[in-house]
Image (tube, grey):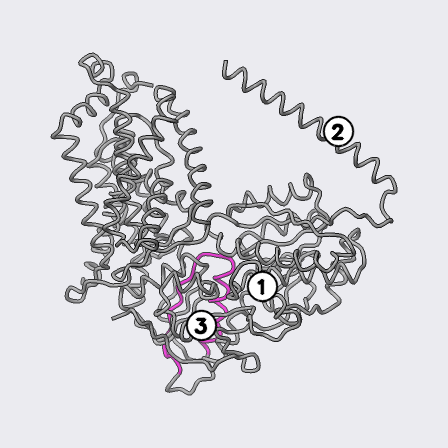
Amino acid sequence: MSQLSTRRGWKAAALGGALVLALAACGGGSSGDGDGGEQSSEPIKIGTSLPLTGEFSQPGQAAKEGYEVWQKMINDEGGLLGRQVELVVKDDASNQNTIVADYNALISQDKVDLLLGTFSSLLNLPASSVAERNQMLYVEPAGGSPEIFSRGYQYLFFAQQATADKQGKVFAEWVASLPEDQRPKTAAYPTLDDPFAGPVVDGIRAMLEPAGVETVYQETYAIDTKNFDTIVNAMKNADPDLVVNGAQFEDGIGMTRSMLKAGFTPDMFFQTNAPSFGDQFTEGIGEENTEGIIYAVSHSPEADTPGNAEFVKKYEEMFGTSAVPEDAADAFAAAQVLQAAVEAVGSIDDQQALADWLHANEVETILGPLSWDETGAPQGEFLIGQWQDGKAEIVLPEDAATAEIEAGWSPGGAG
Amino acid sequence: MEQLVQNLVLGLLLGGVYALAAGGLTLIFGVMRVINIAHGAFLILAAFITYSLWSGLGIDPLLAIVITTPVIFVVGWVTYKLFVAPIRTAPMASTVLLTFGLALVLEAVMGTIWGNNSTAIRPAYGNESFIVGDLFLPKAQVYGGLVAVLVLAVLWVVLTKTWLGRAIRASAVNPAGAELVGIKIGSVAALVFAIGIAAAGAGGAITGILYPFVPGAHYQWIARLLAIVVLGGMGSLNGAVLGAVLFGVAETMTAAYVSPSWATAVPYAIVFAVLLIRPQGLLGSRLREDAVPA
């Protein structure tokens, strides 16, 4: 009986669905007879799928906020090409298979006009392939893995300053330039098995080894690693002066807490991603333990780039804190890049024209000016941040610095 | 040598935590032939409740177990009555589907209540260790191991020394016979399910202190827990403990002496190897498939 009624329910749903489709088709027919050319007053639909749940939920949520701030600001100013912007956001649960299904659905079912990228290289790798196959512009707010740009894609653009392998460049140059008595002699490189975190660490190691910093530990750990005690114990025995940890968020917190538990506090500690999460980072490891931790970062709320102050203000208005997560700013910048292309071309009909324009031009964003090579890889340099007195400061390069770099990591909780 | 001891100790402590989490899963399977895919989700739920008690009311997260576990017990009992009881005698595939659905629902509920951001419980001792000679024993892990031993001991006593335990075992071995002598299988099953979930609850409180967590983290837990239970022998409490300790030690030893990138894979390879030789698991007994209630 219940099976029967379920089946009947399905039938009803299917019928209802067909009806809706038919009605939609009729509606579309009557209003869209002009068939292109003329300006529509319909909102422009921009689709994205973000890791709102699962391992990458931290950056995913932040990116959603960034996109929403951009949407609010542009709609308040009268919209994109005079049309309101509607965001279609799906949740890919940090899953590489789901994200492919999501972007296909955005294109074929939701019929979005434009796409925006997602978070982490791991997810942008498959998602950008869907966009490329459908010949749609794909501006990604993250996804700096060199692998992404090795595929010769034409519609892909990365809206940060540099690819992953160059993210730690400014930091590595600074370490290499230290006087010999201050320069670390040995370094450990534990890294998450991740297409983004790995290349950052490899990039730094490739610069430090020739500078005479000996590698005493170098290992990769899997994404479902929960327990870091063993890795930390091995590092502790190798006794490096510098630890460079290629991390996303959760594993970065786990690694740092394990180091504290083991009483292993190297002189210098560089970590990717996790330290750029503001309050969430201090809550994760304790504010007293953040002092001196160094990281690469794309955005500073204090930077005097055009539009940055307005962005930070709007973000605070909408989400109640001025501690803007880096990933929210990256997402906002990606949307800015898309906006610049659309406004310059003056139409959303020709995605090829949008891509061509971005290949040829520089775009002013809150991260600074961005420009791209033929693979969509950006040509700039990253900022280096450091936690000082419970606050995230920019310490390198010097012209963008908000504070002087401190040499050491001095956690308060460790004995 | 000293390093070997250090790594061994870290592995044993990790195994203790795994045992606590896996004990309930094997209990539920042993009595009810229900593979509870939602077990990891209940574990994370307990971690979130513990987090709220700690951050909101300032209760020490280890003490909070006294509150968390009964709460999770009730949640388990209600879950059983509402969802599992109606299909208790259905084929195993149905209960797997049902509990998988439960896991997804729980994940969404947790995401709605606590948000999908990574959460960490950090009592003062969370970043500290006992120093014994040259060895370091992380305090939270040691406390966690002690709680695991305590909870597992209570479970063992209940199962072997009490009337309830006899009723549970009778229901597992011969449901028809148990019913004939007056045991209400339905009530016993509800209790077992709730006890099993409560054990996961205690485990969740501990793991919440040890590792940061998000609602979606239950997938990683259920994968490990199922492997541990299969390794030990499905339905065997002693087997689960043995499996958990082996799993923990294998994980640490691999990370230390092979490579951390193999640390999460090698334990599963060991499970495969053991199953090739002993399909019933280390301490499991071969079941007569025709005598098992479907």
Tell me the number on the disc at residue A329.
1
Going by the numbered disc 3, the residue's amino acid type is Lys
- Please report contact status of discs 2 and 1: CB closer than 8 Å, yes or no: no
Q: Are the numbered discs 1 and 3 placed on the same chain, yes or no?
A: yes
Judge by depth and name the residue closer to the eye, B183 or A171: B183
Tell me the number on the disc at residue A22.
2
Return the disc, 2 or 1, that comes first in the chain's sequence: 2
Structural crowding at the residue carrying mark 1, measured as other residues with C-alpha within 10 Å and reported as few (<14), some (14–19) or many (≥20): many
Structural crowding at the residue carrying mark 2, measured as other residues with C-alpha within 10 Å and reported as few (<14), some (14–19) or many (≥20): few
Mark 1 → mark 3, Cα distance in angstroms:
18 Å
Q: Which residues are magenta?
A: A183-210
Read off the chain for label 1.
A
Q: Is residue A173 left or right of residue B203?
A: right
Return the disc, 2 or 3, that comes first in the chain's sequence: 2
**Which residue in the structure is indicated by mark 3?**
A391
Image height of A162 relative to A152, above or below: below
* Residue A297, x across and y down, in percent: 52, 69
The total of numbered circles placed on residues is 3
Going by the numbered disc 1, the residue's amino acid type is Ala
> Quick one: SS at disc 3?
strand
Picture residue at 27% right of the left edge, 53% below the top: B59
Q: Quadrant of residue B187?
A: top left
Read off the chain for label 2.
A
